[in-house]
Amino acid sequence: MENKKIKNKKIVLQSNLENVINTSQLEKVGAGHDGIVFQYNNIALKLLKYDINLRKEKNLMTFEKILYFINELTLKRIVKPIDIILDLEGVFCGYAMVFLNNLASEKKKGTSEYKDPGDFLCSDLDCASFELSEDFTILTNKKVIAKDVNRGSYIYTENFMKLCDLDKFIYPNNTALSISDTNQKMLNFTIAKFLYYEMLKSGDFTKSELKLISKWVKKATNNIMFINELSKEISTSLTEPISEYAKTKVKSIIK
């Protein structure tokens, strides 16, 4: 029932209260356990599920968190909120982001626009890793902890990887964990897990081989020098597709 209400909801953006938007007339471009995403011109609108108490309990997006992310974070490859969505009662119900054209989406398969993540070049991976490192440093400096990066967090645009869905990022920080260490591990995991998905495309692996690949992801996640070592490793093959690098890398892992 809640999903039906979201799909047929009249809303306004806080920055433009005069324009009423009806979600029933918009294309749905994403959905998760915590909300539904619609495209509206060049922005993406995420309408949130659950009441505020449940969102706080589950560490999901709150009004306070959105305000902080809008005002305090300037990021290159992590998509942050840029506006607040209100219903016609003036109640906060979601947020807006820049809309990104995901070239690797299922909807684009079979079209000329589709691009598999492995078709991007190692130079794209090197650049994305560096810029994500900068973004994660900003998160650390602003005392935000990155959480819950999963397969649905990746978007692949013309200039390669972006991350979306900051809903479970922790702010205000109320954990005893080291922010810097936690974010460094999440950055490493983000890149290593991407390569893991690309490795799996290169062949059929036995259970023991899959365990070795997963062990590599864990080792990379906990290696403070992982991004630097990756950059050095791919420096001689920057014009090579990532899929080829992943194919070669996985052979060295399971040998």
Image (tube, rainbow, N blue to C red):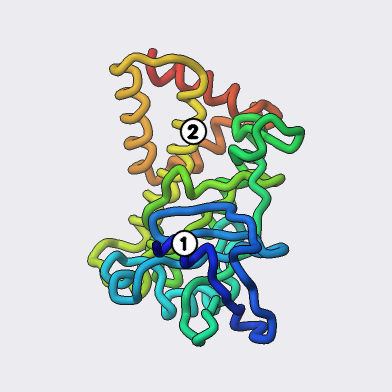
Question: Label 2 is placed on what type of residue?
Answer: Leu
Q: Nearer the viewer, residue 2 or 33?
A: 2
Where 232 falls versus 67 (above or below)? above
Q: Where in the figure is residue 199, as x and y percent of width and height?
A: 48, 25
Q: Nearer the viewer, residue 66 or 174?
A: 66
**Secondary structure found at label 2:** helix
In the image: residue 119, left or right of residue 194: right
Mark sitting on residue 17: none
Query: Residue at 43% across / 38% down in the picture?
Result: 193
Query: Residue at 54% across / 30% down in the picture?
Result: 233
Work out whether residue 164 can be spotted. Answer: yes
Where 169 falls versus 211 (above or below)? below
Residue position marked by numbered label 2 in the rendering: 195
Q: Where in the figure is residue 135, as x and y percent of width and height?
A: 53, 60
Q: Where in the figure is residue 101, as x and y percent of width and height?
A: 68, 50
Q: Where in the figure is residue 139, as x and y percent of width and height?
A: 46, 65
**Secondary structure found at label 1:** helix
| Mark in the foreground, 1 or 2 | 1
Residue position marked by numbered label 1 in the rendering: 4
Question: Label 1 is placed on what type of residue?
Answer: Lys
Q: CA distance from mark 1 to mark 2?
A: 37 Å
Query: Residue at 47% across / 46% down in the picture?
Result: 152
